[in-house]
Amino acid sequence: MKTPIVVITGPTAVGKTRLAVEVAKQVPVEIISADSRQIYRRMDIGTGKPTLTQRRIAPHHLVDILDPDESFSAADFAQQAELAIGRIVNKDKFPLVVGGTFLYLKALLFGFFEAPGRSDEIRARLRAESERFGGEKLHKMLLDIDPEAAGAIHPNDHVRLIRALEVYEATGRTVSELKREQPSFKRNLFAGVIFALTMPREVLGLNIRKRVDEMFALGLVEEVRSLLDAGYDRSLSSFSSLGYRHVADLIHGKLTLSQAVEATKTQTWRYAKKQMSWLKQDWGFEFLSAQDGELNVTNVAQRCKKLLQPVSS
């Protein structure tokens, strides 16, 4: 039998966590975070991590599981999330997957391309080139060897560019070739619904600007400073979290406070637009207007209760 789950996704600052916690007041759910930055310890403010109060209302899984210098792939997420779902179901509770990292969700729900193992040496060198020359150079390098992959990766997506180039250097074969050799499949382990929260772009833009201001007011600069003081370098993958490298540049005197704030707002808005474009994929989303707060809580809670019956029986 397929395990029933409910997913709540959507762009950053749209209210995913808030909705999930309100649902938890009505249904015995536990939440699995599908957020590629909330996995890191000591990175709380800039990742918009659920508060301690929210975590007391609903237990959260896959939050604070790694140090900032540890790696975690989409395949790792799928494996850990599947284990968490099993534990939740065994407690006669309902698994609610919440987050906007679509690569994580794709790996969990539909399976994922199994690429060769990582090479820390190659990755470190490519990351240094990315820091020095920017994504445009990496994108051109990938375009020369794998135009198909380059066409699907934005020049600003340094992580995927580095990974594609790393695979080629390590194996002599392109990601596109390797993907074609692996049969596509659907994990097909779960039954349920994928709710996608939406919001008018102008309202979401205002929410993002407000959230970034709140993060700086809550001590984002101090949080980043403590990470740097602890020896974590700004070149780490964890520092690609929205705002962290801009704040590191502020601390190192490369940006003023106002410049760091505006750069973080711009970066966050770009990421939100990318998330909105992902919602155009054919995943069978059920779209909810984030402005219908109470109605959404009722809708999601009722769906969870209905799906919970076979879990509890």
Image: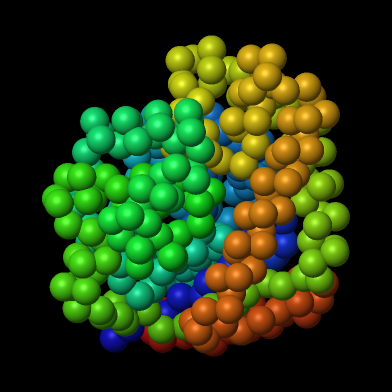
154 vs 48, left or right, is left
Query: Where's residue 29, x and y in %?
Result: 53, 66
Please indicate, yes or no, whether residue 31 appears anywhere in the rendered image.
Answer: no
Q: Tell which of 79 and 134 is nearer to you.
A: 134
Does the image show residue 271? yes
Q: In this view, does 9 lie to the left or right of 64?
A: right
- Tell whether 305 sits left or right of 313: right
What is the x, y in percent for residue 284?
52, 86
Looking at the picture, does residue 312 appear above or below residue 221?
A: below
Eyeballing the image, is 64 above or below 223? below
In-image side of 86 versus 23 (left or right):
left
Applied colour scheme: rainbow
Farthest residue in the front direction?
144
Q: Where is residue 301 in the image (x, y as percent from the top left)?
A: 64, 77
Residue 280's place in the image compared with 12, above or below, is below
Quadrant in which the N terminus appears: bottom left
- State the residue in front, 166 or 269: 166
The residue at the point 62 percent across, 74 percent down is 196
Q: Residue at x 59, y 74 (%)?
A: 279
Q: Residue at x 64, y 23 (%)?
A: 249
Residue situated in front as seen by the camera: 250 or 216: 250
Q: Quadrant of the C terminus?
A: bottom left
Image coordinates for residue 119, horizontal then vertical, percent: 22, 38
Q: In which quarter of the image is residue 197?
A: bottom right
How many discs mark residues in the rendered view? 0
Residue visible at 62% across and 42% down? 242
